[in-house]
């Protein structure tokens, strides 16, 4: 799926050590960035976490608020990859 969809995690609130601890605790292996000033979240109108922002190749975005279980996340990513 990586040739069609790429996942990048964005952490917002908390300290850098909280951020690193969360990544380690949950075994996150996809690329992540810290957004402590909230700039990325503001750009996409995300008022709180957890949230997902889906970006299309034409630059359009869609925000999905709330957490996802693995099954739902994979289904949504597969649907995006299918176009």
Image (spheres, rainbow, N blue to C red):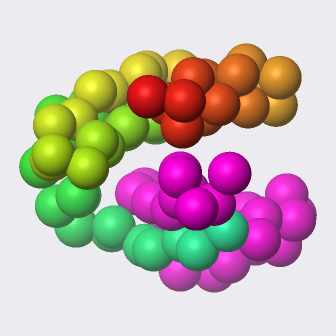
In the image, taking residue 58 as reference, residue 1 lies left or right, namely: right
Q: Position of residue 23 (x, y in %)?
A: 74, 68
Q: Is residue 3 above or below residue 59?
A: below
Extent of the magenta region? 1-29
Q: In this view, does 49 lie to the left or right of 62?
A: right
Whether 11 is drawn above or below 78: the answer is below
Q: Is residue 67 visible?
A: no
The residue lying at 22 percent from left, 35 percent from top is 61
In this figure, what is the number of numbered marks? 0
Which part of the image, by quadrant, shows the C terminus?
A: top left
76 falls in the magenta region:
no
* Res 77 quadrant in image: top right
**How far across and down, in percent of the image, does residue 65 sit?**
43, 21
Residue drawn where x is 45% and y is 74% of the image: 33
Q: Tell me if I can see residue 26 in this picture.
A: yes
Residue drawn at 16 percent across, 61 percent down = 39
Residue 5 part of the magenta segment: yes
> Please, is residue 63 above or below residue 61 in the view?
above
Q: In this view, does 36 lie to the left or right of 3?
A: left
Q: Does residue 10 appear left or right of residue 75 in this picture?
A: left
Q: Where is residue 57 in the image (x, y as percent from the top left)?
A: 26, 50
Q: Where is residue 48 in the image (x, y as percent from the top left)?
A: 36, 33
Depth check, front residue: 42 or 71: 71
């Amino acid at each position: 799926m990586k040739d069609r969809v790429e996942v990048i995690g964005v952490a917002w609130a908390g300290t850098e050590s909280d951020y690193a601890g969360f990544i380690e605790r949950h075994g996150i292996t996809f690329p992540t960035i810290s957004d402590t000033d909230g700039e990325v979240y503001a750009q996409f109108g995300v008022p709180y976490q957890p949230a997902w922002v889906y970006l299309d190749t034409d630059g359009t975005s869609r925000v999905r608020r709330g957490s996802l279980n693995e099954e739902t996340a994979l289904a949504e990513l597969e649907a995006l990859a299918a176009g």
